[in-house]
Image (spheres, rainbow, N blue to C red):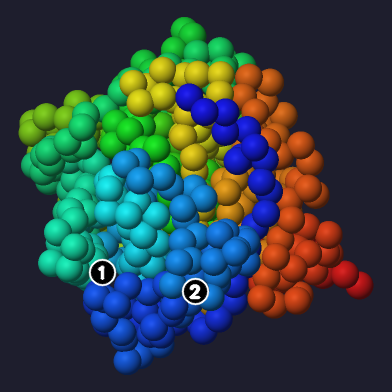
């Protein structure tokens, strides 16, 4: 394995700001015939800000600078070699915005992916593989996602023009359909999926996990079966089920959304790596109970009386019935839940809304989820193709953040759209995340997963000091992000993070 230390030590982050909307016409062709643009590809009559932004950041990073402006410009050739496998990992959480907002404040827009595919294919010179893959949330309707994004039009374009296959992979083993008020992953609602065609690898970080020092095992994961989550994070085991498609990448291109997150502050590269896990119930989301009882499920004194009673009842029913994953348990839950949903919930709507905002570790005191994020960053860089953790980086990573429309407020699932027109790119995931967080108007020092990675004694993340992160931009005011006291975009954080995360405006 080639020593990649020099690659990861490049802390340059490019920030390109352009128009604040997306081209909506598939297959999302460039709107200008750039010198390097393949003549066999079409030209859009409407502006394509994402293509312009991706191209702009690659230029700002100085990639293949000697050929820029000519037909020979091949920026990703400095990262991708012919014959390699390139995995493009977007942020595909959901197929709909359940609060009626803009879906693309939640997920990566396909026009960003199209530009990345064009430059990756150029670097491969047609020899190698490009795979688009992610593990959305379990209630994401992937077929609906494909229909709403027209992502398949990109694969079809490459199949038709170049005879080159670009598979789009849903890495999940199951999903369930959200329908009306029936937001319950009961057994009868679950639909099996083929999963990752290349399989999964079980990776045990053991003593190198951020959970190694945590004695409390009253964990809750992504699903109702807490026993499964706890079994993989106890007695020296800190285990994750990781996609072999992801592990098989020679180059992993992360394409996250610029948005806030209820459990870890912000969704960027690190949190986006949840999409590399094929069994998300191995991921610790929070620890049951309030802080005074050793948990981080909700803030102290936020839930009282009726709210606390409702939460306990819901917990009992899900632990006793839904966690068993059988039809009888699901039917019994339905019998108990329906009267509550029809008669009691409408009366207590304000109380239940308060529960949903903060319950589930949705606040800055969540001391569990950040550890999971830290662990996933380690795996993405240091796990080899067989899932064995090594001492040196095993693949190149590259980041292109879709911030043309970001998400603020009740993120990551119900955010308000924030049109900022940004594409942010860089070589080091941690460096890009730190710069993006500052651009959002947040203090990276308030995010424990960043501090943990900076101080990690087992793995090197090549950011000796966050002030070493160097930003370059087509906008002067964004060219020195790390040495500015400006709040920049001033994103509204999730309610559970308000007053904790924001950079204060200079007086």
Q: Residue at x 41, y 18 (%)?
A: 388
Q: Residue furthest top?
A: 235
Q: Residue at x 53, y 75 (%)?
A: 69
Q: Identify residue for label 2.
A: 70
Would residue 87 be found to the left or right of residue 273 on screen? left
Would residue 471 be found to the left or right of residue 186 on screen? right
Q: Nearer the viewer, residue 200 or 158?
A: 158
Q: Residue at x 38, y 67 (%)?
A: 115
Q: Where's residue 236, x and y in %?
A: 49, 9
Q: Nearer the viewer, residue 64 or 94?
A: 64
Q: Where's residue 264, x and y in %?
A: 56, 46
Please rate how many residues cluster around mark 2, counting C-alpha atoms within 10 Å: few if below 14, some from 14 to 19, many from 20.
few
Q: Where's residue 124, x and y in %?
A: 35, 51
Kindly indicate the quadrant of the structure image that contains residue 291. top right
Residue 260, can we see it? yes
Q: Where's residue 97, x and y in %?
A: 33, 67
Q: Nearer the viewer, residue 249 or 348?
A: 249
Q: CA distance from mark 1 to mark 2?
A: 32 Å
Q: Residue at x 19, y 26 (%)?
A: 324
Kindly indicate the quadrant of the structure image that contains residue 428. top right
The circle drawn on residue 149 is 1
Would residue 130 be found to the left or right of residue 330 on screen? right
**Along the polypeptide, which appears first: circle 1 or circle 2?**
2
Q: Is residue 313 above or below residue 138?
A: above
């Amino acid at each position: 394995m080639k020593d990649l230390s020099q690659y990861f030590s490049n802390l340059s982050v490019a920030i390109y700001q352009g128009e604040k909307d997306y081209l909506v016409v598939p297959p999302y062709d460039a709107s200008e015939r750039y010198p390097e643009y393949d003549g066999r590809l079409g030209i859009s009559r409407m502006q394509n800000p994402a293509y312009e932004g991706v191209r702009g950041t690659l230029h700002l990073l100085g990639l293949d600078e000697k050929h820029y402006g000519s037909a020979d410009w091949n920026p990703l050739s400095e990262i991708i070699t012919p014959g390699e496998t390139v995995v493009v990992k977007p942020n595909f959480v959901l197929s709909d915005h359940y609060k009626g907002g803009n879906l693309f404040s939640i997920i990566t827009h396909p026009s960003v992916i199209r530009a990345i595919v064009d430059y990756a294919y150029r670097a491969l010179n047609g020899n190698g593989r490009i795979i688009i893959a992610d593990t959305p949330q379990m209630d994401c309707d992937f077929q609906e996602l494909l229909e709403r994004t027209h992502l398949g039009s990109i694969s079809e374009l490459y199949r038709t023009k170049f005879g080159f296959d670009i598979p789009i992979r849903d890495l999940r083993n199951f999903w369930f359909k959200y329908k009306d008020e029936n937001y319950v992953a009961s057994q009868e609602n679950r639909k099996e999926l083929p999963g990752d065609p290349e399989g999964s690898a079980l990776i045990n970080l053991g003593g190198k996990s951020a959970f190694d020092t945590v004695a409390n095992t009253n964990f809750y994961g992504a699903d109702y079966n807490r026993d499964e989550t706890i079994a993989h994070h106890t007695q020296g085991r800190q285990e994750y089920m990781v996609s072999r498609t992801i592990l098989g990448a020679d180059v992993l291109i992360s394409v996250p959304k610029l948005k806030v997150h209820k459990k870890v502050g912000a969704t960027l590269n690190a949190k986006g790596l949840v999409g590399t896990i094929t069994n998300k119930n191995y991921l610790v989301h929070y620890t049951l109970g309030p802080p005074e009882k050793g948990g981080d499920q909700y803030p102290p004194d936020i839930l009282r009386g009726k709210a606390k009673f409702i939460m306990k009842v819901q917990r009992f029913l899900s632990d006793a019935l839904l966690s068993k994953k059988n039809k009888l348990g699901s039917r019994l839950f339905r019998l108990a839940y329906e009267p509550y949903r029809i008669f009691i919930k409408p009366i207590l709507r304000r109380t239940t809304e308060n529960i949903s905002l903060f319950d589930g570790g949705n606040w800055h005191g969540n001391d569990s989820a950040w550890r999971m994020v830290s662990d996933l960053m380690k795996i993405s860089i240091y796990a080899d193709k067989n899932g064995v953790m090594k001492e040196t980086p095993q693949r190149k990573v590259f980041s292109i953040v879709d911030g043309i429309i970001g998400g603020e407020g009740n993120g990551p699932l119900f955010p308000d759209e924030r049109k900022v027109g940004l594409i942010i790119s860089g070589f080091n995931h941690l460096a890009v995340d730190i710069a993006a967080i500052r651009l959002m108007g947040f203090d990276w020092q308030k995010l424990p997963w960043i501090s943990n990675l900076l101080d990690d004694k087992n793995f090197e993340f090549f950011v000796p000091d966050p002030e070493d992160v160097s930003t370059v931009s087509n906008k002067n005011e964004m060219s020195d992000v790390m040495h500015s006291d400006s709040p920049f975009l001033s994103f509204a954080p999730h309610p559970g993070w308000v007053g904790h995360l924001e950079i204060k405006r200079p007086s």
